[in-house]
Image (spheres, grey):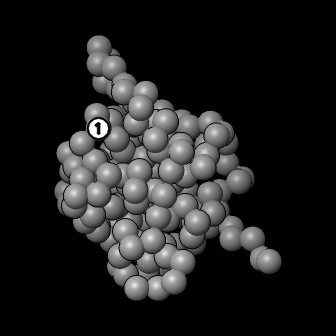
Amino acid sequence: MLKGISPVVSPDLLKALAEMGHGDEIVISDAHFPAHDLGKDCAYVLRADGLGADRILAGIAPLFELDQYVKAPVIMMAAVPGDTLDPEIERKYRTALGYAAEIERMERFAFYERAKKAYAIVLTGETGKYGNIILKKGVTPVS
């Protein structure tokens, strides 16, 4: 364990976050996401079984700068036509990230295509419907 780093951030996840560069993307997925199929070309497919995606998001938020040079550095999967979103999922993700700006919604299969190009996918135990989110890494400010 390291001081100041959430215990939900595994050593492999910490390594992936450190390796990511400006513009790289990470998918924090729900338990139903086809991560191992879609992530064949990703640098990492990591498992966080038993943890809700909001816990992973809260764990990485202090370590991860969102890209300030794009309109929406946070993307979530849109509901399939005829289905509905659970607003609680977005609310808890916003709270976990401390994020109040725009969240882009992306059609399911377009989201899958984008996920294939992600640097990493973290498959969580999240069971909320459409509980998939992509974060685009920004530039860490120099203090």
Q: Name the residue furthest bottom.
A: 2
From the viewer's perspective, is 141 left or right of 37? right
Helix, strand or loop at label 1? It is loop
Q: Position of residue 30 (x, y in %)?
A: 28, 47
From the viewer's perspective, is 133 left or right of 64? left
Q: Position of residue 121 (x, y in %)?
A: 34, 61
Q: Position of residue 54 (x, y in %)?
A: 41, 51
Q: Nearer the viewer, residue 13 or 75?
A: 13
Residue 75 visible in the shown view: yes
Question: Is residue 35 placed above or below 81 in the rendered structure?
Answer: below
Q: Nearer the viewer, residue 110 or 76?
A: 76
Q: At 46% across and 36% down in the image, what residue appears?
A: 90
Q: At 36% across and 27% down in the image, what residue appears?
A: 86
Q: Nearer the viewer, residue 40 or 14?
A: 14
Q: At 40% across and 36% down in the image, what residue appears?
A: 89
Residue bearing mark 1:
128
Q: Amino acid at mark 1?
A: Gly
Picture quarter with the N terminus: bottom left
Q: At 28% across and 48% down in the image, what residue appears?
A: 126
From the viewer's perspective, is 128 left or right of 104? left
Q: Position of residue 97 (x, y in %)?
A: 55, 52
